[in-house]
Each structure stands twice: as C-alpha cells, then as structure tokens.
Image: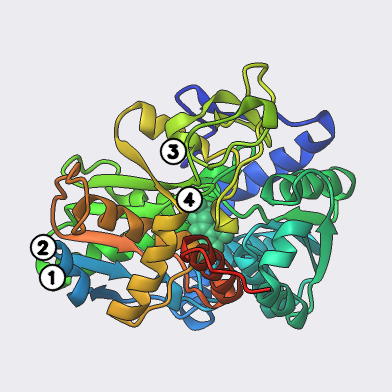
Amino acid sequence: MSQPDTKFGEYGGQYVPEALMPAIEELTDAYRRYVLNNEAGFMDEFSERIEDFGGRPTPLQRAEQLSSRYGVDVYLKREDLLHGGAHKLNNALGQVLLAKYMGKERIIAETGAGQHGTATAMAAAHLDMPCEIYMGRRDINRQRPNVFRMRLNGAEVNPVDIGRGTLKEAISETMRDWATTVETTHYVIGSVVGPAPFPAMVRDFHAVISEEIRSQTAAKLGCLPGSVVACAGGGSNTMGAFAEFLGEDDVDLYAVEAGGSSLTVDEEAGVAPHSASLSTGEEGVLHGARTKLLQDRHGQIMESHSVSSGLDYSGVGPQLSHLVDEERVTPVDVGDDDALEAFHRLSQDEGIIPALETAHAFGFLETTLGPDGDGSVEFEEPVVVNVSGRGDKDLEAAIEETEARELENAPDMEVFE
Ligand SMILES: Cc1ncc(COP(=O)(O)O)c(C=O)c1O
C-alpha cells in the first residue's frame, strides 16, 4: 500500500498545535486510502469530475510568435483554460471531494489572488458543500472580480485585517478557524504548503498537469520536454508541472519566483520588496512546515511583495525547497516590471492574457532570450511554459500599475499658473 510523503530531506513535517493533530492524522489516513490507494474508486470519480466539470485535458499549444522571437520551440500548457481560469481547480475539486468522502460538512479555504478561493467556491457549489473563504483585505482590494465570483458561487468571503492583509495572514486565520472546527470542517489549503500531508496531496492532485504534458509532447513531438518553466508562489502549479519529470534528469525544471521591485532587503522595514524565498530564503518554520522562508536575522518572518497577489508569499512548498537544494530545480526571479511587460507581450503576440503570476514565467524567457536578454540560460527544447491562469482577474491591477509606471516615466511637465 502506498504511503504519504511527510518529509522532503530536512523540509516538511507537521509543526502544528496539539489541537490540530487529530485532524492532520484523519486527513493523512484519508489521503493514503482514497488518493494513494484509490479506495472506493475515489481517484476514478476525481478523474471523471475534473474532465466533465473541469474541462481536462487542457491543450498543449505551440506559441508561434514566442518561438520565433526567442529562437527556441516554445509550447504552452493551457491551464488558463481549466474551469475557473487557473490550475487551482485540480486541487480544490480533489480536496472538496475528499472532504465528502471523509464525511465533513463544511469547507474553509484561504486565498491570495482569489483563484484558489474561486476554485474552492466552485467545487463546493458543484459538490453541494457550504464554504467560507478567508482573504486578506489588501488582496480583496486587488482582486475584486474574484471576490464577486466567490460570492456568486455561494461562498462567504471573510476579510482578514491583520498584518499586511495578504496570503500569509489569510492562511493563519484559516488555520485558527480549523483548530476550533476540525470535527465538521475540512481546510482546503491552496498550494503545496502547510503541514504534511498537504504538500504531497496537493502535488498529487496537480500532477495531472505533467502527466498530460508527457503524453502530449510524446504524441505531438515524439519526445519529452527539454525544459519546463512555471511560476512559483507556494509552488502548486510548479509541482504539478514538474511531478512527472522529477526522475527524468534530461528535463530541466525552472521555478520562477517574484523578484518584486528589488532583491535588496531593508531589514528595519520588516518587509522584503520581493517574494523570492527559494533563491534568497533561509530555513525556518511557517504554517506547519519547515521550508525556505523570508526572515530577518532574528528569525522573524518578513512580509513579502509582488505585483501579483498569488506570488506574494514569504514561504514556499517544502518539496520545492528540497529540490532546489538537490539542484534538481533551478530557482530564478523576475521582477514586477518585467512581469508587467510580459503580461502585455503575451496578450499582443499570442492573443492570451495571462495572470500576473503566470506573466513571471514569460518574463523569464524575455530576460534571458529576448532582444535585451542576458543570455544566461541555454534552454533545452522544446520549452514548455505552464500558463497557470488567465488574466481577467488582473485587468484592474494591470491598468493601475501600467498607468503608475507611465506617469513615473513621463517627461516633467511644465506647469502654467
Ligand atoms: C494563476 C495563478 N498562478 C500561480 C499562482 C501561484 O500559486 P502556486 O505557486 O501555488 O501555483 C496563483 C495563486 O493564486 C495563481 O492564481
């Protein structure tokens, strides 16, 4: 019988309060039985629902303009075409279904960009479960269309006012709720983070992305991908796109983090101007797991920053931290400006408006292979970029950010009294 992964080298684990241990043990047992060993045909039902309700398989499409711009063969894994507009539904539907099998009566979740909250609200409506979503106040303001979508799907959205009002605080608040409601409630965590078994379980629900990439590149091109590129916040679309290739040493794996406005940190401010925990973080414990974190010299977690809410997180999944230490995954970072440019370029060149999170992955191609690129990476081909989500939710934020930059760069205007 397959057993759950709980540690990844020195990372992972279950650093939770006593009150949560019964829920973690119950969930570990359910994950082992239903997901890993397909008891009661759970995985068959999941596969059927993610096809019929979710719209899988998602296409693998050649990006013609990008291929000629960069001189390498670029393919797009179109997770933006999954129901809800992002990869998040794979995990949300899997976990809400699992909660049903476990006899739970209520769903709670946190969300940053709102995509996981939306996916969970959709899955809960689909499976007829009441649902509450915690979301930082700052993210609520940045992602209003998704807040409306969650409410349309019948979910209650609870604003979180502590800290900077982003994903970190939303996760903490959801864990607080769960600690007092474990008997009836399942917490649908939104990325490959948190205490075991979440990182492994969330990876397994998203592994369908790389399983499809493997069969699609085989069918279309008769080979494996040479490189797989995905943006990393907590790391769920990354792990989903990488899972199937971890044992294939010829497939290069790139995790693109948010470089924000700079990688230089002013410790006094307590806020890092980026979210690059894989490339700059140090080992510590956050949200129940040991992983790479943004922290100050006293070990206090630093707040993060990114133009994209979904990458704006001080931690990252423990398995990714391990894979970076093992040099199996290469972490790279792309800043706010390059991500915004990539957002516009993909929209214009390929007719695909990407999520701001996803735009970071495309920013990586431009900053290495573009006309002003640094040529620092020699990509093995074909290059598959995971289009983790579509950008409709980001239109307002992109307009604001673009206008702010245009104003900053405008020549000084003469003022006539
Ligand atoms: C479209 C999209 N891509 C990527 C992410 C980052 O999450 P993860 O790193 O777990 O894939 C998010 C998070 O909300 C998202 O909405």
Q: Are marks 2 and 4 in contact (CB under 8 Å)?
A: no
Q: CA distance from mark 1 to mark 4?
A: 33 Å
Is disc 1 placed on a helix, strand or loop?
Answer: helix
Q: Is residue 329 found left or right of 306 in the rendered image? A: left
Q: Name the disc covering residue 331, or none.
A: none
Q: Name the disc covering residue 320, or none.
A: 3
Judged by depth in the image, the label closer to the viewer, 2 or 4, is 2
Find disc 4 in the rendering and name its residue.
203
Q: Nearer the viewer, residue 198 or 86?
A: 86
Q: Nearer the viewer, residue 415 or 253?
A: 415
Q: Amino acid at mark 2?
A: Gly
Residue visible at 58% across and 43% down?
193
Mark 1 surroundings within 10 Å by alpha-carbon count, few (fewer than 14), some (14 through 19), many (20 or more): few
Q: Amino acid at mark 3?
A: Leu
Q: Nearer the viewer, residue 117 or 357?
A: 357
Q: CA distance from mark 2 to mark 4?
A: 32 Å
Find disc 1 in the rendering and name its residue.
68
Q: CA distance from mark 1 to mark 3?
A: 31 Å
Is tag 3's residue or tag 2's residue first in the polypeptide sequence?
2
Q: Could you tell me residue 31's position as x and y percent?
A: 59, 49
Q: Amino acid at mark 4?
A: Arg
Is tag 1's residue or tag 3's residue first in the polypeptide sequence?
1
Q: Name the disc covering residue 71, or none.
A: 2
Is tag 3's residue or tag 4's residue first in the polypeptide sequence?
4
Residue visible at 16% across and 50% down?
379
Judged by depth in the image, the label closer to the viewer, 3 or 4, is 3
Is tag 1's residue or tag 4's residue first in the polypeptide sequence?
1
Q: Residue furthest right?
A: 180
Q: CA distance from mark 3 to mark 4?
A: 11 Å
Q: Amino acid at mark 1?
A: Ser
